[in-house]
Image: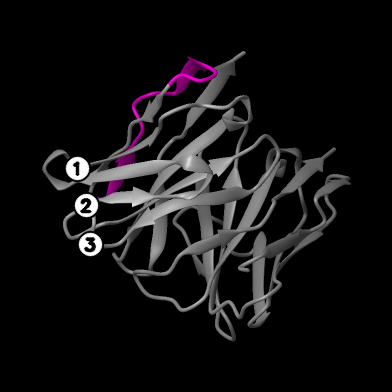
Amino acid sequence: GAVVSQHPSRVICKSGTSVKIECRSLDFQATTMFWYRQFPKQSLMLMATSNEGSKATYEQGVEKDKFLINHASLTLSTLTVTSAHPEDSSFYICSAGMGGGSTDTQYFGPGTRLTVL
Amino acid sequence: AQSVTQPDIHITVSEGASLELRCNYSYGATPYLFWYVQSPGQGLQLLLKYFSGDTLVQGIKGFEAEFKRSQSSFNLRKPSVHWSDAAEYFCAVGSTSGTYKYIFGTGTRLKVLA
């Protein structure tokens, strides 16, 4: 149980284009979803937290107009990287929590490798 | 401010040897602590978690961790390492400051020698 999928697993795009990454909880309803960014050989950096049906909460320094997050249902959240540039190339990982609150365990997706040419 | 420190960036052990990965946290209240493992190019898999109760927590793949409040530590251990354990290991604390979220340590990369 508690499986989270991401699509696509890899994407290559040209500079200036937009890319959408999907995060799905396959066997549970995710009250909260999280988006992380991970640079090579570094830790995970939380970008934003999203709750179903409400606006995402972005971490300091993350451009909300560049990284659009939509959490339209309890099983789907999307991250759209708008007007992507080479510096946006990274590994993006989502996670999902079931019930919210301080004891909630996050279940992580397999990640999406974005390369912007 | 809450923080998590993993002092060892890299650790190399021989297959069959014991393993201990260190994790220290800074948190004002009772922490909610997690260990995750990440294989190359993959997402994170939960190994174990501590919320309350018994301070020695058993996880998957033969791992265990011990919560020591006096030392602000939550070290991960395994008595006998297998080559398949080579991966990146992350310690995390659940933060309730503002929106609930995880604070991750910088990770420890484990290499296993045959």
For label 3, the residue is B53
Residues drawn in magenta? B1-17
Q: Chain of mark 3?
A: B
Q: Is residue A104 visible?
A: yes
| Chain letter belonging to callout 1 | B
- Residue B112 position within the rendered picture, expressed as x and y whole percent measured from the top left: 57, 19
Residue at the image position 25 percent from the left and 62 percent from the top: B52
Are the residues flagged by discs 3 and 1 from a single subunit?
yes
Asked whether residue A80 appears in the rendered view, the answer is no
The mark tally for this picture is 3
Residue denoted by label 1 = B72
User: Is B4 one of the magenta-colored residues?
Assistant: yes
Q: Earlier in the sequence, mark 1 or mark 2?
A: 2
What amino acid is labelled 3 in the image? Gly
Residues tagged 1 and 2 counted as in contact (Cβ below 8 A): yes
Left or right position of B12 against B18: right
Q: Residue at x 41, y 62 (%)?
A: B101
Q: Nearer the viewer, residue A39 or A5?
A: A5
Discs 3/1, front: 3
